[in-house]
Amino acid sequence: MTNMLLAVVVGLAAGAALRPVVVALAVPVGRPADCPACSPRPAGPTVLRLLSSGCENCRGQLLDAPWWLPPAATAAAFAAVAAGDATGWYAAAQYWIAFLGTALLLVDSAVQRLPDALTAPAAVGTLVLLASAAAEGEPGSLPRAVAVAVAAGVLFTAFALGSMGLGDAKLAVSLGALLGWRSWQAAWAGLVLAFTLGALFAVFLLLVQRRSRKSTLAFGPALIIGTLAVLATGP
């Protein structure tokens, strides 16, 4: 109970810090994240440009997202990790994905994109933390984690030739590594659950929001939620 409460508190704080990142990256593909009113625009990464800009329009953009959404979502993700039995570096890898995965979930839900600014550090950080877990002799398999990560990346890259995007393939690398570290069963369970959640979400949108079958749907949230659910309760 103490660990769960601590995870929620840390998740709330991490989510509050994550909010500017979510707002800065939640722009449709092909549209610049910079504020058109800034001339000249501040130099540096997008998030830092928005945060450091003296433009009132930029500062207004940072306040557009509901203030409670990133903290609440991150706290829920951290609670899911705390509900599992992971410890050590493997637990750190799960919290890393819960942190960046929350931002990816919110951005993808809003504008149907999974930016490299989040998927790249998610993959690199996950592999580094899993390598640390292997070095410490924690239960799990690094070769299996790498194998599942590669297989997931290849599989979702093939899907990208159809209706999915390459962002899903990049995200699948880090999620596959986390699941593969635990077991082959966890990897399969995560894949099945992700597609089940994606299908249910698509049906919900078709019925409630009157979307057409050709509408673009975000699959990242299903991947992230499915992975965290399996890690918390699965094999």
Image (spheres, rainbow, N blue to C red):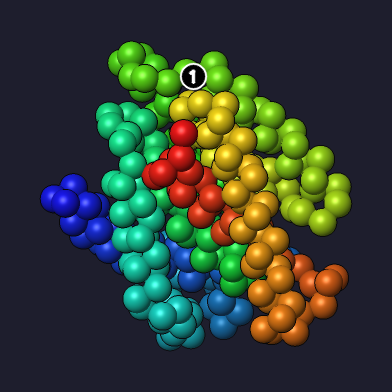
Residue found 47% across the figure and 59% down from its top: 103
Q: Position of residue 210 (x, y in %)?
A: 75, 84
Residue at the limit of the structure toward the left, as seen here: 2
Instruction: Give the amino acid at mark 1.
Output: Leu
Regarding mark 1 in the picture, which secondary structure is present there?
helix
Q: Is residue 134 above or below residue 149?
A: above
Residue 129 vs 10, above or below: the answer is above
Residue shown at 42%/26% (left/top)? 130
Q: Residue at x 58, y 34 (%)?
A: 187
Q: For this view, does 104 lie left or right of residue 69? A: right
Residue 62 makes an appearance in the image: yes
Residue 39 position (above or below residue 10): below
> Which residue is at a point 76% across and 40% down the rendered structure image?
157
Task: Estimate the x, y position of residue 129 in percent, counting from the top left.
Answer: 39, 29
Question: Can residue 49 be seen in the rendering of this structure?
Answer: no
Q: Can you say whether 186 is above or below 104 in the image? A: above
Q: How many marks?
A: 1
Residue, disc 1: 142
Q: Position of residue 151 (x, y in %)?
A: 69, 29
Assess disc 1: are there few (<14), some (14-19) or many (≥20) residues with their C-alpha within 10 Å of its C-alpha: many
Q: Image quarter for residue 150?
A: top right
Q: Position of residue 196 (x, y in %)?
A: 65, 55
